[in-house]
Image: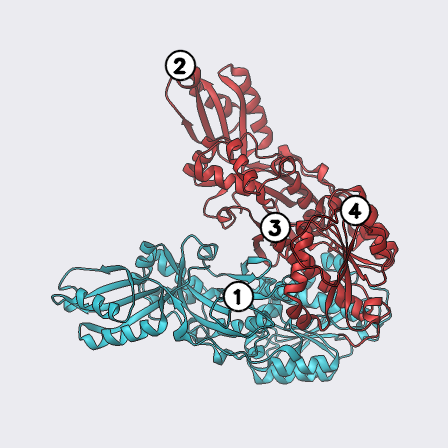
Chain colours: A cyan, B red
Amino acid sequence: MSGQVSDKPGAAAGKQVGVGLIGFGTIGRGVVKVLRENAAVIEKRLGFPLRMVRIADLDTKTDRGIPLDGIQFDADAKGLIADPRVDIVIELIGGYDVPRRLILESIAAGKHVTTANKALLALHGKEIFAAAAKAGLDVGFEASVCGGIPLLRALREGLAANQIESVFGILNGTTNFVLTQMEATGEPFESVLKRAQDLGYAEADPTFDVEGIDAAHKLALLATMAFGAELTFKEIPTQGIRGLLPIDFEQAAEFGYRIKLLGVARSHKLGGQSGGQADGREQLEVHVRPTMIPASSLLAKVDGAMNAVVVRGNAVGPTLYYGAGAGEMPTASAVVSDLMEIAREIARGGRGPVSPMSFLAEHIAPMPFVAEEELVGRAYLRMLAKDQPGVLGRITTALGAEGVGIASVVQRGQAGAEGGAVPVIVLTHPTRRAGLARAIARLAKLGDLVGDVRVLEIEEGV
Amino acid sequence: MSGQVSDKPGAAAGKQVGVGLIGFGTIGRGVVKVLRENAAVIEKRLGFPLRMVRIADLDTKTDRGIPLDGIQFDADAKGLIADPRVDIVIELIGGYDVPRRLILESIAAGKHVTTANKALLALHGKEIFAAAAKAGLDVGFEASVCGGIPLLRALREGLAANQIESVFGILNGTTNFVLTQMEATGEPFESVLKRAQDLGYAEADPTFDVEGIDAAHKLALLATMAFGAELTFKEIPTQGIRGLLPIDFEQAAEFGYRIKLLGVARSHKLGGQSGGQADGREQLEVHVRPTMIPASSLLAKVDGAMNAVVVRGNAVGPTLYYGAGAGEMPTASAVVSDLMEIAREIARGGRGPVSPMSFLAEHIAPMPFVAEEELVGRAYLRMLAKDQPGVLGRITTALGAEGVGIASVVQRGQAGAEGGAVPVIVLTHPTRRAGLARAIARLAKLGDLVGDVRVLEIEEGV
């Protein structure tokens, strides 16, 4: 230990720090496993043991399949919070209101907290961090974004000297698994999702993942830590992966791209050019959507349920962090690493010196958003056109009329296919979104199309 | 700040922490730039400013091309160390003896230290860390391994809950640039190296990089932080990239591999199977050498002067960290991030609670090495065989006689080429190195070969 005398129970006892777990599900079981299986290495790094002393869960019946010797296990969360043997409370029950209450009660009881609950933090983070700061307590949440990848520490400490220019990546393993499978098999979304559910990669209700909400929760936290931007996930334009067709993956490959559900947060200096200027005025570009990225980029190689995030700093340039973004043991790895950091502070009788959101609270404020229509980039357009004479000409003319340059046009299938309608794919040159939107409105008026135009943005700089 | 009263000058002054720089070369200039250009964001994260107050370098004449307003600049390193305005001394002069002395003098003077000098730490780290610990001071060295990538923090904190199973990767940008160019252009080593020197990617004397010594320095530090293994770079079997031929890259591509200079540190449980058991007996596999890795792996996509390292933990599984491993601004990013971490501790009047080498000093000890000949893996063999009847048969027979299974044999070129000798490439099945060594001895006795057999190990698990 640091040799300092401590005023906290764990270190007052002098020999160990006690943790209590609320919510004994998959991740909770992983935490118990890591604390036991890695007890020796944890003590060699910490200098003292880290002990699970108590677990609370409404379900005390189900056998979790691991020994709980020496651990008190009941349904009494309040009792756990009040238990003097508990220095750190681990919240792993999920949801919003109940964990919010339990975490605030833990802080009120003088207990440090760790959580993997990104949804909670994306909604109530400000309140929770303020309460903890006031009480001189720590809140660990590395596990809440990209599971086992030590990404938040990188933003908070490893890259602290940088003006962050952008943070973007694959923030959700379920959707990346589905996209990878759709690309590999050519199967439609529904059947691949079904298989992902059978394999346990997707929930019975996959809405949070598939609609991009989980990624938006994480991106909101990342944007605050990267730019000091105060925002909630509800402010993030979010598009899920439903509606992608096998043809989109085929065409992406032909054009040299892959399709990933990308969460992007980028700082724009006023004047438009990218690259944050912390002491100047800047605008925030932020969105979650299926995106085409160059097949040659590192991010494009991230397959299956894995996560990867690129962080660009004005000094360090691009950096990338890759690993398992979810799962019992990877998530537990992050939770227990947080416990160790907090335990060190308990042992020295203080709290972590680093601001949890990287910027001091007084420097976290709402940031103006970039107007989407001002963004410039290449785009992929997929439409179903009636097989009529001159249809391709009318489509390209409509695009040109709004200044949308065309890099490539592909008409798929044979005349008469799909009831006289054929898929038409357009790859544009870099174009302002406003012009693209007007062009798409024009296309709708032509009367040549069946259904809507599907747009996929292209990110080159990944 | 943490609200605690401090006994250190910087925080006693209450409003800033002062840093002094010894060694005003490229990296030093980057540090001055980052401190000035990012002053606003640094203060928003820190809560107080970080000021460069003094610089010492024997060369005070050369114009570094940046304003030094308010910074005292002379050749007086001793004066800098003694200067009460200096809370943290940055050592960036390189070499061994002089920086060692200056760092120990700084510690004796009660100053925290940061350095980017991996060679120094690989040789004198133990002595320096012990002195700092005794004095209650911090030594920051994130910049010493893989430049701007916050890799050491990941090992020390983000993955602290794990038993590390392996750490391996591309630790040297110069050699990765050369290998990438050789592969892309088909040119021989010497001409590519020459171009790398012209472009500033390689030193005039490239020995440290090309022979793998720089990578071994870094790997020694990584092995200590990952496994608590006490070792010096001199104990690491190290092989450089000289002697690789264009044909090796062509064949690697044909077999689905790429060639990278890989630093590998892996823990073997006794009994042979991989995966560290911190409380059990383990052996260390450690080496730096050109290695064939699957072209489909993320590591294989790391091109040019970039670095990337894979860290496998028993809970988190594989994680990867990618970024610029060298250069003025990326390295400065790591130095200044260290300064910020130390400045926080100065402000609270303490020192960092984390053991610099991740394990407490008393748990860092020599670790037995795995006997190389016991390792099992696939290998690539390149030899020049006299074009004589039955030569391929004799080669394959010699290999088979030592139990070396053959996955593929390729005879290149035409009869009569290269003075009657033709290149023969063999890809083996997984084989014990001992048997491979005996087989190669047999080949030498055949009298069919011109020159030696070149062996490249293959790492599948990357």
Residue B230 located left or right of residue A152: right
Badge 3 density bin: few <14, some 14–19, many ≥20, Cα 10 Å: some
Residue B72 rendering spot, x and y as whole percentages: 78, 58
Q: Residue at x 30, y 58 (%)?
A: A251
Q: Earlier in the sequence, mark 3 or mark 2?
A: 3
Q: Is residue B434 above or below residue B200?
A: above
Distance from Cα at disc 1 to Cα at disc 3: 20 Å
Secondary structure category for the residue under label 3: loop
Q: How far from the left and from the top, in percent, is residue A168? A: 50, 65
On the same chain, marks 2 and 1? The answer is no
* C-alpha distance separating marks 3 and 2: 54 Å
Give amino acid for label 1: Gly
> Are dots 2 and 4 in contact, CB under 8 Å?
no
- Chain identity of mark 3: B
Which residue type carries mark 2?
A: Pro
Res A363 seen here? yes
Q: Is residue B283 above or below residue B349?
A: above
- Residue placed at 69% from the left, 55% from the top? B142
* Residues beneath discs 3 and 4 located on the same chain: yes
How dense is the environment of label 1, judged by Cα within 10 Å: few (below 14), some, or many (20 and up)? some
Q: Residue flagged by tag 4: what amino acid is it?
A: Pro
Give percent across and percent down for residue B426: 46, 29
Say if A291 sits above or below B361 in the image. Answer: below
Residue named by callout 2: B389
- First in residue order: circle 3 vs circle 4: 4
